Amino acid sequence: MLGSTLVGIMRVGHTGEVSVVRLMIRSRDGDLVVTGFEGDEIAIPGDGSALVGAATAPDEISPRWRIALAHRPSQTP
């Protein structure tokens, strides 16, 4: 969850230069599938935005890719 919106991480990877993530955003306005790169700000309809951070490749601690996402709430009520 980011804010009041369900955000599903569908795929995470690295292009060789930057991290990349494919997200499914399920909000009251409908479903949206979007691809974002490290440093992007992805709009979440009616709930602000998600900031895409760096991805971490699988290692001995986690067998899966991980990525940092941060929620930036809408500035308007």
Image (cartoon, rainbow, N blue to C red):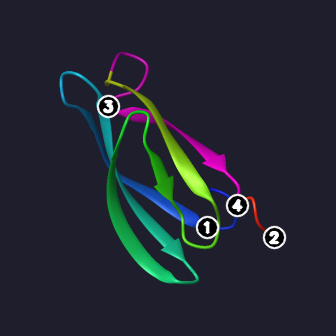
Q: Are marks 1 and 2 in contact (CB under 8 Å)?
A: no
Q: Position of residue 10 (x, y in %)?
A: 33, 55
Nearer the camera: disc 3 or disc 4: 4
Q: Give how far across and how far down residue 19 sits, in percent.
A: 32, 31
Asked if the residue at tag 1 contacts the one at tag 3, i.e. Cβ–Cβ closer than 8 Å, the answer is no
Q: Mark 4 points at which residue?
A: 74
Near-viewer residue (68 or 51): 51
Alpha carbon of mark 3 to alpha carbon of mark 1: how far?
23 Å
* Disc 3 from disc 4: Cα separation: 25 Å
Please tell me which of labels 3 and 4 falls first in the chain: 3
Residue type beneath disc 4: Ser
> Where are the magenta residues, as a range?
59-74
- Please tell me the numbered disc located at residue 5: 1
> From the image, which quarter does the N terminus lie in?
bottom right
Residue visible at 46% across and 54% down? Answer: 42
Which is nearer the N-term, disc 3 or disc 1?
A: 1
Q: Distance between the residues labelled 1 and 2?
A: 15 Å
Q: Element at badge 1?
A: loop
* Kind of residue indicated by mark 1: Thr
* Residue 70 falls in image quadrant: top right
Query: Looking at this view, is 67 or 76 the one in front?
Result: 76
Q: Residue under circle 2?
A: 77
**Number of the label disc, if any, that sits on residue 19:** 3
Disc 2 versus disc 3: nearer the observer: 2
Whether tag 4 and tag 2 are in contact, CB under 8 A, the answer is yes
- Looking at the picture, does residue 4 appear above or below residue 12? below
**Farthest left residue?**
16
6 sits to left or right of 31: right
Residue that appears at 46% across and 67% down: 25
Other-residue count near label 2 (Cα within 10 Å), few / some / many at <14 / 14–19 / ≥20: few
